[in-house]
Image (cartoon, rainbow, N blue to C red):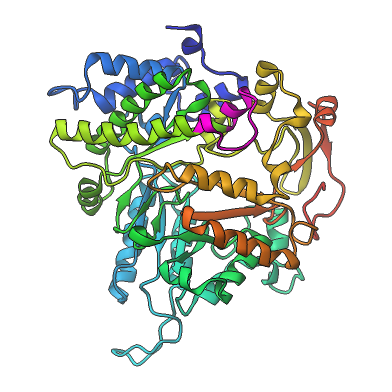
Amino acid sequence: MSVTALNPFRTTFAENIFRQKYAQGDDDSWHALAVRLVDDVCGRFQGKGEPLLSVTDRETLVEYISEMKFIPGGRYLYYAGRPFHGWNNCFLLKGEEDTREEWGALLNRASSCLMTGGGIGVDYSVFRPRGAKLGRTGGVASGPLPLMRSINEVGRNVQQGGARRSAIYASLNWRHQDAEEFLHAKDWHTMGVGKSGYTLWDAKQDDFNFHAPLDMTNISLNYDDAFLEAGLCETFLRNVDQACRSGEPGLSFNFGPQEMDTLRNACCEVVSADDSDVCNLGSINLANVESPQELESIVELATKFLVCGTLRATLPYEKVDTVRVKNRRLGLGLMGIHEWLLKRGYPYEVVPELHNWLGIYRVGSNYHAQLFCDALGISRPVACRAIAPTGTIGIMASTTTGIEPLYAVAYKRRYLTAGTVWKYEYVVDATAQCLIEEYGLDPDRIETAAALAPTPERRIKFQADVQDYVDMAISSTINLPAWGTPHNNPDTVQDMARLLRQYAPRLRGFTCYPDGARGGQPLTLVEYATALRERGVVFEEHVACKDGVCGI
């Protein structure tokens, strides 16, 4: 085994993430985790029967994981070798019929999924709008938003697997009569806090954990084929306006053969039409792959690994197992794409060489999924590829996450101490520093998400170009300048709407984050030289934060 495999961590911070989240004991190592994970997922089931993969395949797969060329999702890493095989990241739910019984059943399904540690996404489009008459009781319907808020509160009070903040997504069809109310469901800046004179947005600035409606939940409107005929309709324009102001609601696109695939997981990369479908994620770290030939081998074994996961994972209730057998979704994703581009001197574009590598990813995952499932005598996957945000595992691998560019080379990080005192430090991004040192990059010339914010088409086109190779979806958040600035204001909304309408048929969704849009934003940009000069010094803020993001 190479030195890299024995000690794959590029920074102390990356190793600390492993120690804090995934190591099982002080003596554990990344290689040891890889060994027990591959044995758990692909070896003999509970020590009995024939292994699912050959000895050679298992040994090679251990090597790829050890060298961080393939990293299974965080749930796989955490549960490696544990009796409970909670390997699935998220569950996809929907209201199936407009009845009060389904309200209770959906709450039960959501609770069951959250308590096993998975996030959830829910499509509420089936439920009748607020104010509709109820035939049996003579009353009126409350609409789907109270149910969304109820599930949000379940998420607040159910720690995922006893340890993690809940991840929840909610969606509604763009033609639903409550779409307008949904668009403004998270307008915290207009919602007062008692008689304090503060809004919920102000309160969130001072305390990110202050309770607010749907604060555990990401929300989006679903757009179907009828939208393509409607063009720049008023609902779409208001949706784009809201997204540019506050980041939500996002937009979910489902057209043609995929029109019914309105369900999403919490991060929106896995799609389905079936209630109780499930995620099954792992990512190829493109930055560490040495050649197209090696990529072919990694795609084959990573695909087989995820197929094995569909046979071994523990699930919260019987229907999830039934849907998993039917669909057998594999979420083979990518990460480290921006590092791959930077080390070759490319701009943030899907250049011809990257197109070739993406083709290997697409063709290989389809081919080996079908071949391996046929050999095992099980159903073939209905989809094989989904690109997750890879936040934690991207940090652990010290590479760029998902398809995202680096957020920033340097920034000011603010945090709350003693409940009321805001402090801040200047930080050089650990991944950026690795790339600067290893590839001799000029820190002032690296294209970052923050630098690309005034020109969102670069990011949107990149997502569309990669989406051409992905049969489910891509989780990506496009940074925008703060609302009210020259590149993001009421006069730019029409242009943004036209841009999104142009790319919508090649996207599965759009999510953005305008700078400063949510309370407690911890990071603001600074120059690299400033961060180097002030690194390690802790400062205290002495300015009230009510009217904006502190420290800007």
Question: Residue 387: which quarter of the image?
Answer: top left
Side of 34 relative to 538 (left or right)? left
Q: Is residue 528 visible?
A: yes
Residue at the far front in the pictured view? 352
Residue at the far right in the pictured view? 542
Is 390 located above or below residue 125 in the figure?
above
Side of 490 relative to 126 (left or right)? right
Q: Position of residue 253 (x, y in %)?
A: 46, 60
Is 408 in front, or is 105? 408
Is 322 in front, or is 503? 503
Residue at the far bottom in the pictured view? 138
Q: Position of residue 461 (x, y in %)?
A: 57, 47
The residue located at (55%, 62%) in the rendering is 501
Q: Position of residue 166 (x, y in %)?
A: 47, 50
**Is residue 161 one of those drawn in magenta?**
no
**Is residue 343 one of those drawn in magenta?**
yes
The residue located at (47%, 41%) in the rendering is 388
Q: Which residues are magenta?
A: 338-354
Q: Is residue 215 visible?
A: no
Side of 315 relative to 210 (left or right)? left
Side of 379 relative to 169 (left or right)? left
Is 149 in front, or is 299? 299
Looking at the image, how many numbered discs can be counted on the residues? 0
